[in-house]
Image: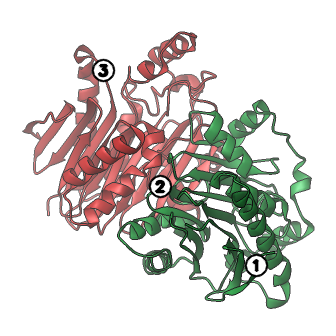
Chain colours: A green, B red
Amino acid sequence: MLPVLVVHGGAGSIPRKNEEPYSAGVQVAARAGYAVLREGGSVMDAVVEAVTLLENNPVYNAGCGSVLNEHGGVEMDALVMDGHTLSSGAVSAVRRIANPVQLARLVMEKTSHLCLTAEGASKFARAMGVQEVQEESLITDYARKRWKQNLDRDSNPVECQMGKMGTVGAVAADSEGNVACATSTGGMLNKMEGRVGDTPCIGCGGYADNRVGAVSPTGHGEAIMKVTLPRLILFYMEQGKSAQDASDEALAYMWERVQGLAGVVVVDPRGGWAARCNSKQMMWAAAQNDVLHYGLQAGEHFSQPLQ
Amino acid sequence: MLPVLVVHGGAGSIPRKNEEPYSAGVQVAARAGYAVLREGGSVMDAVVEAVTLLENNPVYNAGCGSVLNEHGGVEMDALVMDGHTLSSGAVSAVRRIANPVQLARLVMEKTSHLCLTAEGASKFARAMGVQEVQEESLITDYARKRWKQNLDRDSNPVECQMGKMGTVGAVAADSEGNVACATSTGGMLNKMEGRVGDTPCIGCGGYADNRVGAVSPTGHGEAIMKVTLPRLILFYMEQGKSAQDASDEALAYMWERVQGLAGVVVVDPRGGWAARCNSKQMMWAAAQNDVLHYGLQAGEHFSQPLQ
């Protein structure tokens, strides 16, 4: 079986002229996560490494670069899941943490719980020696500008949401058939304080099961939640569908039931993978067998040798 | 089709001599929720009414009577879901609210989000005119006694968890095939501050879909989450299984994968229903066709005319 790592940098709609940094970022993350796998790291090591890089990259809506809530603050959600044990860790509405995905992993590994929220998550971070950062260090000028624009009474919140790529995530499978997923987000632009979206919710923000595969989604969180999109895709795969067919069928079902737009990255334990969306765009990259694959527009697929 | 309402008052293990108030409480809640249905109320009205009564009853671990967290505080989770629209509302780690289930319904009906957490949920409650209560009014002498016992270094936390019934919940179907679910809990005894369990997580704390049915679970939250138990049961029902067979198969799967103990109440849109557990006990009651059904030990089933 061929190890594989697939990342996404969010679904949405950005102009062609702005796409270069988004594309570069997912390619760097895919390379780095894949290198972890190749050097013998676990699938969990690999997805956390890839998502950490995406959190640290200010162009994405996760970690530094997160969108701002209604009060101009940053509240982030993240999830990891290990397909071998079905163990999972998540944080919701956490503040002043540079890498929520790493904190989510600590919740999985160091507590008997699966999710910690808000101030309780911050206290846990302190107890684990995770450095708190200034909130300002997570806020970009662009994020503040969009927040202010969206405060205008005549702004179109749906259009504003689509001006930037969203949530980031990664899935990986190793040569032994282990799978894992990780997802991280700043959530929705100008969301209410305390809003929790799909990301920290197991089965919605991701799911991983060595018997079937792993999924990380991005897009309209509330729609993803209503159909538990990642869990749904894996049910379709259990019934014999490929990663791609299962993704397309689940995205079509989500559209039919709740008119939601989203994208997903998916792996199966045999190294099969897919990056699919029913939105116009999803920024993604995949690394397998010394080839780097990537794309942005729905259906687009470029590839080049992985140095 | 026959309207039906089924409630649970938690899975666990209580001595026979203590069971009377638990049994009385679920019977009262089932009667009241069923009366709402019979008087033309919606399935959402019915499940919220039933769960509100269970929250107000100090014997259950929800609302007044909630277990205490590691610091002796009360943090509660609740979820509602409407099977017609797949709309859902939830609150997590909310404090000083007498009826979290009603606040979860307000999240569904008054915001564009599906879940609000911690202080953000409290601010929303204030904005909606929901009265905050003194934390003391939610804490029973018994809850404080158990919290103190469990602080002992040589206490057995698993045994302590089982000393009291848990989470409460309800599912309902009306004569037109609409279904809904509601679940509410104080969580795990001596949990970490900010711990979020299965309850506010859609697909884990409940799921409702008019095409299939509705489920509310109780038991070991982390195990329920790892297999997204309610969503799993509904997948099995979609494949043609009855509510009872789907529940038994999903509970057996949860035991096989993650050794979890739990119980569920389930309805389908044709009025079929089940109350099943793989724990020794789950306190439940159901009302349909002028008969009240109830039980505590696994497999137990009493019935009497509904006055």
Q: Mark 3 sits on what residue?
A: B14
Residue drawn where x is 44% and y is 15% of the image: B142
Cα distance between the residues tagged 3 and 1:
56 Å
Q: Position of residue A57 (x, y in %)?
A: 84, 64
Quadrant location of the N terminus of chain B? Answer: bottom left
Residue drawn where x is 43% and y is 24% of the image: B161
Residue B49 seen in the figure: no
Q: Mark 2 sits on what residue?
A: B202
Q: Mark 1 sits on what residue?
A: A155
Q: Position of residue A251 (x, y in %)?
A: 49, 77
Q: Position of residue A136 (x, y in %)?
A: 91, 54
SS for tag 3?
loop
**Res B235 label:** none
Q: Position of residue A198 (x, y in %)?
A: 58, 60
SS for tag 2?
loop
Residue drawn where x is 18% and y is 45% of the image: B287
Which quadrant of the view contains residue A77?
Answer: bottom right
SS for tag 1?
loop
